Amino acid sequence: MNETQILEALTQVFRDVFDDDNIVLTAATTAQDVEGWDSQAHVNLIVAAEMRFGVRFRTAELESLHDVGQFARLIESKQRGA
């Protein structure tokens, strides 16, 4: 999957976690842009993304992320085995 495909799949993950079909993600989306994105929702997003994309994240990797685009690129690199 490329970054665009991952972003599309992440949009569905976000919609499921937040139970909101109106969420539209961009690479620049941050937690401040999504109503209800608190620490508990963040954990749920990480777990749901791990399940959806078949990857595992280390805490240090996640701490450096600032937006959805960085998250998508991290997923892409993990899928490539980097």
Image (tube, grey):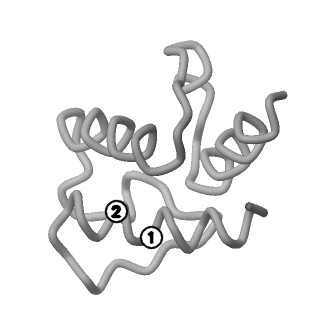
Residue 28 location in percent, x, y?
A: 62, 64
- Percent position of residue 62, x then y: 54, 27
Q: Residue at x 73, y 47 (%)?
A: 76
Q: Dot 2: what SS? A: helix
- The N terminus is located in which quarter? bottom right
Q: Which amino acid does label 2 sit on?
A: Phe
Give how far across and how far down residue 8 sits, in percent: 56, 74
Q: On screen, 65 above or below 26?
A: above
- Name the residue beneath numbered marker 2: 14
Q: Tell me if mark 1 has few (under 14), some (14-19) or many (20+) residues whose alpha carbon lies within 10 angstroms of its own.
A: some
Horizontally, is 18 left or right of 73 in the view?
Answer: left
Q: Residue at x 62, y 26 (%)?
A: 64
Which image quarter: residue 81?
top right
Left or right: where does residue 13 sit relative to residue 10? left
Which residue is labeled 1 in the image?
11
Q: How far apart are marks 2 and 1 (CA)?
A: 5 Å
Q: Please state which amino acid type lies under the numbered disc 1.
A: Thr
Location of residue 22 with respect to 5 vertically, above or below:
below
Outermost residue toward the front in this view: 54
